Amino acid sequence: MIVPIELSQTQNVTYDITIDKLPKLSFDRKVVVVTNPTVAGYHLGTLLANLEATELHVVTIPDGEKYKTLETVENILNECFEHKLDRKSLLIAFGGGVIGDMTGFTASLYQRGIDFIQIPTTLLSQVDASVGGKTGVNNSYGKNLIGAFYQPKAVYIDPEFLKTLPEREFAAGVAEIVKMAVMFDKEYFTFLESADLKDEEVLKEAIRKSVELKAWVVNQDEKEAGIRAVLNYGHTFGHVVENETDYTTYLHGEAVAIGMVMANALAIELGLFSQEEADAVKFLLQKAGLPTEYIIKDVDAFYEHFFLDKKSANNSIKFILPNGMGGHKMISDIDPLLVKKVLAEFGAVRC
């Protein structure tokens, strides 16, 4: 199954997202595979058995969000220099969202830009992070604040890689699936309510639908000037949760799940979302094993963190909120007192 990316605002940028068994890949150039020890231990043999290149190298970087830094990118760059890559060389991101983001960012920097492809191995990266060309790293100020929009040449999604995924990592990917349904497709949300994502065929259908929705959005708005910002539902709140916990307590998808619950509470306060709809989202997240609780200890500090969000501008915070199931609304200039009222409810363990 192939889902095309055809960027309407960028000339000559098209590529395919292939959802199927990993095909044989052959490249008449130098190739560097970037992965981590966990993915390499399970799947590197499978990749190498399907990969041919003029010269092939593997760079293994530490596993985890806390290593998503400029220092790690510099280490990858140094490996590229050591192996004398040129502008015709290729990087392959083989792992989850952290690997994909850093490999893509490295590709955008090396000799002012070389090709890369995505072979995502986590559910989160298959349904979201590998599609659309967002790359970058974290720093002390927040998540993905340093990066670039840099599109891959291809994405290969093989659901077989998910069979070794820990349950917690799998659940983190479900959060992004739920996000897409709540924002864009009420019927898809209804499908998910009764879906058994541990069933291989049902999972493939969920991956396909999520990728198609993501591709539809990215094709209209590559650089998040409009509708693509809607994909950040749950992220504005979730990024603060990640930052407050130093990226060590929650996986990205877990923080997004908490963020969706918080966003829903604000949407209820504004009359955009019903309590019944919010409860349905919360139940679906909990069914997947995702956290929906977070205690905000300092409401003012939590609120101030919003201004480091990439969607904020001119001292105004842009909130992405559900507008009925399957609908969305971007709102700026919400009264800070109203937002803080909602945040204060989480200080009372409301989630």
Image (cartoon, rainbow, N blue to C red):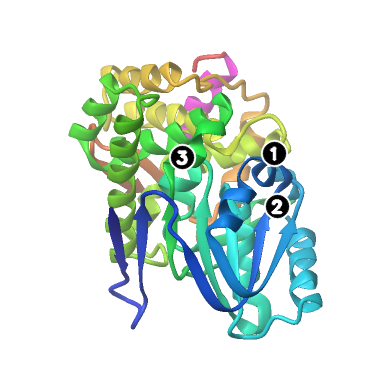
Residue 303 lies in what quarter of the image?
top right
> Within the magenta stretch, is there residue 347?
yes
Visible residue check, residue 322: no
In the structure shown, which secondary structural element does the residue marked by tag 1 occupy? loop
Q: Position of residue 162 (x, y in %)?
A: 50, 36
Q: Nearer the viewer, mark 3 or mark 1?
A: 3
Residue found 61% across the figure and 39% down from its top: 240
Question: To which residue does mark 1 refer?
Answer: 247
Q: Residue pushed farthest left? A: 187
Question: To which residue does mark 2 refer?
Answer: 68
Amino acid under disc 1: Tyr
Q: Are marks 2 and 1 in contact (CB under 8 Å)?
A: yes
Q: Residues within 10 Å of mark 1 (few under 14, many from 20)?
A: many
Give the main secondary structure, helix, strand or loop, of the magenta stretch: helix
Question: To which residue does mark 3 refer?
Answer: 160
Residue 271 lies in what quarter of the image?
top left
Gap in Å between the C-alphas at discs 3 and 1?
28 Å
Left or right, 146 with reference to 283? right
Which of 210 and 179 lies nearest the eye of the viewer? 210
Q: Nearer the viewer, mark 2 or mark 3?
A: 3
Which of 298 and 133 lies nearest the eye of the viewer? 133
Give whichever of discs 2 and 3 has the lower sequence position: 2
Q: Residue pushed farthest front? A: 49
In the structure shown, which secondary structural element does the residue marked by tag 2 occupy? loop
The range drawn in magenta is 338-348
Q: Position of residue 196 (x, y in %)?
A: 33, 21
Amino acid under disc 2: Lys
Give whichever of discs 3 and 1 has the lower sequence position: 3
Q: Nearer the viewer, mark 2 or mark 1?
A: 2
Left or right, 56 with reference to 155? right
Gap in Å between the C-alphas at discs 2 and 3?
26 Å
Give whichever of discs 2 and 1 has the lower sequence position: 2
